[in-house]
Image (cartoon, helix red, strand yellow):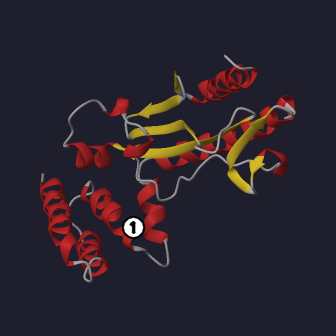
Amino acid sequence: MSDLDVVMRGLMRDVGSALRPRGFRGSAGVWRLVTTGGVAVVEKQGSRGSAWDARLFYLNTAVVPTVWWEWRTGATGPVDRAGQADGIRLLEGRVQGTDPAHADNGYADRWRVAVDTDVDRLRVDLLAGVTHAAGRLAELLTPGRYLDELLAQPDKQVGHWEALVVLLAERGPSAELDAAYAGLRDAFADRPRAAGHVERVIGWAQARAAG
């Protein structure tokens, strides 16, 4: 094992230690905060740009509300096994640093550990970013918060509408849900191949709202 691999393992242990007081549990690069409303995830992702003298990595974050998990998986399997790829991933983002010395080619969310890195300085920056991200995830996981922030978006994009339909379905039938159906259909109006998916989302949401 190279010295950089040892450094990386130590940094990931430090990430876990920073997350644990905030209710996250996990190891091996995946940490989860499990609540009655769903799961928040922090997950390490390596980068192809890594080399013998440098390691590049991201810390991805995601929020997986229980109703979103039900839609994505058909409620098969426990939500506490959800990963970053299962999240809504519209408001979460990646853990970012504030010290440009640790950013790879200016990307604040792509961390770089090299042979000449001041590891103590990087650790301070990394853990500050992790702590901030953990607070934001816990905030988004509170009941209704993710939905309320999506509804407040002034310029909704294609990707917003599926999440709005699914999250609104949990509240039951409503004028807002009907408007979200219309928004989803309009967003994909110029993509006829997606029509089947759109109607599956709406059909699922109608059944969920009625049930």
Residue 61: x, y in percent?
A: 53, 44
Q: Secondary structure at mark 1?
A: helix
**Most distant residue in the top direction:** 1
Residue 77: x, y in percent?
A: 24, 31
In the visual, does 100 lie left or right of 210?
A: right
Q: Residue at x 49, y 72 (%)?
A: 153
Classify 67 as above or below 174: above
In the visual, does 112 lie left or right of 61?
A: right
**Most distant residue in the front direction:** 52
Q: Residue at x 32, y 34 (%)?
A: 79
Between 35 and 15, the one lying in front of the other is 15
- Residue designated by label 1: 160
Classify 88 as above or below 180: above
Quarter of the figure that contains the N terminus: top right
Where residue 58 sits, quadrant-wise, is top right
Residue 123: x, y in percent?
A: 78, 32
Classify 193 as above or below 122: below
Local crowd size for mark 1, using a 10 Å CA cut-off: few (<14), some (14–19), many (≥20):
many
